Image: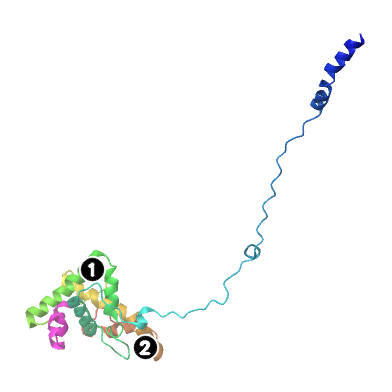
Amino acid sequence: MKRRNFVQSLIIAPVAPAAVLAGQAAPTQTTPKQPAAPKPNTPARQFSRQPQNVPFLDLTEADLTANPAPHYFNAAQFSTLQKLGAVLMPPLKNNPGATEAKAPEFLDFLLSASLEDRQKLYLTGLDGLEMQSIDKFHKSFCDLDAQQVDAILKPLLVARPWPEDLPSDPMQNFIAQVHEDLRSATMNSREWAAAAEKSGHLFSRGARTSGYYWKPIDPISEG
């Protein structure tokens, strides 16, 4: 009887520590928390910082440092336009003319970005004047003297009750519009404004007639 109890004690003895260990709660495996990323605390976050000691450079417009070069009309067409500017809008009453105000150069730039029908009007008109000049006087329009220019332009200048009433004849239409364009480009130029400021005279509607070629057929008059 004692032997049986002894044997049972030998069988149970190794099991007891295992049972005790099994009864203990296994430690919980927890993932360590990652520390939160610190919020940026740079000076740029705290307050806006503008560049310091940035030099301010004086800018000069291109047309004050160099003469604009024609790029739309060819050489003959541009020379004809310059001649028209000198004849239709000459310097008057201490005001610059179309040549001094670089109106032909401005129109050359303007026509390069104009609608096709406007471009066609100018190209056909300038070429037409050149052809008439060669046919009548055997030289380019830009080389004509005042009397020869009169002989070509006078038949193309017609009276208009209103500026919007353009002639139906293509060449007369061209002369009417180029005349108006040269005047507008001249009177809105930097040179015209400088002359007006120097003389102390402001622009007025009456001054609009001062630059017309052959004043008796001026379509806009004060009469």
Answer above or below: position of 47 versus 193: above
| Residue located at (17% from left, 77% from top) | 76
Mark 1 highlights which residue? 119
The percent coordinates of residue 154 (x first, y second) are 15, 81
For residue 142: magenta? yes
**Would you call the spot at circle 1 few (<14 residues within 10 Å), some (14-19), or many (20 or more)?**
some
Indicate which label's residue lies in the foreground, 2 or 1.
1
Q: Earlier in the sequence, mark 2 or mark 1?
A: 1
Which type of secondary structure does the marked residue at label 2 adopt?
helix
Answer above or below: position of 25 versus 181: above
| Residue located at (20% from left, 76% from top) | 175
User: Given the image, on which type of amino acid does mark 1 rest?
Assistant: Gln
The percent coordinates of residue 36 (x first, y second) are 69, 50
The percent coordinates of residue 146 (x first, y second) are 16, 88
Give the magenta part as a residue range.
140-157
| Residue located at (29% from left, 80% from top) | 103
Answer above or below: position of 188 versus 9: below
Mark 2 highlights which residue? 195
Report the front residue among 195 and 142.
142
Residue 117: image quadrant is bottom left
Residue 95 bears which disc, if any?
A: none
Report the front residue among 177 and 163.
177
Report the front residue among 214 and 8.
8
Farthest residue, direction top: 1
Farthest residue, direction front: 3
The quarter of the image holding the C terminus is bottom left
Residue 76 seen in render: yes
The quarter of the image holding the N terminus is top right
Question: Are the two marked residues, 2 and 1, in contact with CB atoms closer than 8 angstroms?
Answer: no
Real-space Cα separation, disc 2 to disc 1, in angstroms: 31 Å
